[in-house]
Image (cartoon, rainbow, N blue to C red):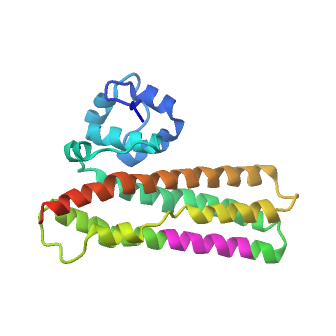
Amino acid sequence: MDKILFSGKMKLADLISANHSLILMLPRFGIPLGFGDKRVTEVCAKYGVPADFFLLICNVYSFDSYLPDEKEVVSTDMSRLVPYLMASHNYYLKERLPHIEQHLNRIADHMNEKYGTVLKRFFAGYKNEVSEHFLYEEEVVFPYIEDLISAKPCGTYRIHAFEKAHNDIEDKLNDLMQIIFKYLPENVPQGDSIGVVFDIFQLSSDLHKHSLIEEKVLIPYVKLLEKKLV
């Protein structure tokens, strides 16, 4: 894209209004609502969040075509990168996935037992896959990044291994949607059926943005850190 919409001079309220989905990002930065007419830089300073990092994440999250160049990555304070990604993991595992699972369990109770069991098992398998994906990042990738930042010995591991194996964990949600569309009975309360479809679409979109942040920010940043070891 030719122009980035978000800047530190903007009011944070205007930034959120420009992309309502960014409201989901604030807790991951430790920023509560109630910031009034304060600018992005003011709010970030109040809560100890590097404004350049906050804006980088918001821009990547909002604009699929935006690719930060090496100069921007090098000049950005990345001290909150790992905490931000950890907060995202907690949001998915402790809030969104359990919420969707409750919806799906209520729906499965209205379905033919065979299809209801398939639905529950499919989502349980998906949740386990997401948990394993995040566990690998938390036990291998994040400690590796922290060692690089601290200039500690890092062994033979390189971020290329993560990049090569990196997959989009939102893909199976499309299969889940097809199961719901094809086999959902008419007697399911609309509040449950519409609610769970909306939640899955929102989760899929958010996970896609999470993957983009890893691809456009985390991997390039770590590669630059690795260059310093050579």
Identified at 33% across, 72% down, the residue is: 161
The stretch drawn in magenta includes residue 145: no
The quarter of the rendered structure image containing the C terminus is bottom left
- Decide: is 148 above or below 18: below
72 vs 7, nearest the viewer? 72
**Please, what is the dominant secondary structure of the magenta stretch?**
helix
- Decide: is 51 above or below 29: above
Q: Residue furthest top?
A: 37
Q: How many marks?
A: 0
Q: Is residue 82 visible?
A: no
- Decide: is 218 above or below 163: above
Relative image position of residue 16 (x, y in whole percent): 47, 32
Identified at 70% across, 60% down, the residue is: 177
- Decide: is 114 above or below 54: below
In this rendering, would 137 be left or right of 203? left
Q: Is residue 56 visible?
A: yes
Relative image position of residue 159 (x, y in whole percent): 29, 67
Identified at 56% across, 69% down, the residue is: 127
The quarter of the rendered structure image containing the N terminus is top left
In this rendering, would 225 be left or right of 128? left
Residues drawn in magenta: 118-130
Residue 4, quarter of picture: top left
Residue 135, quarter of picture: bottom left
Q: Residue furthest right?
A: 187
Residue 210, quarter of picture: bottom left
Relative image position of residue 91 (x, y in whole percent): 47, 56
Relative image position of residue 207 (x, y in whole percent): 50, 56
Identified at 37% across, 40% down, the residue is: 31
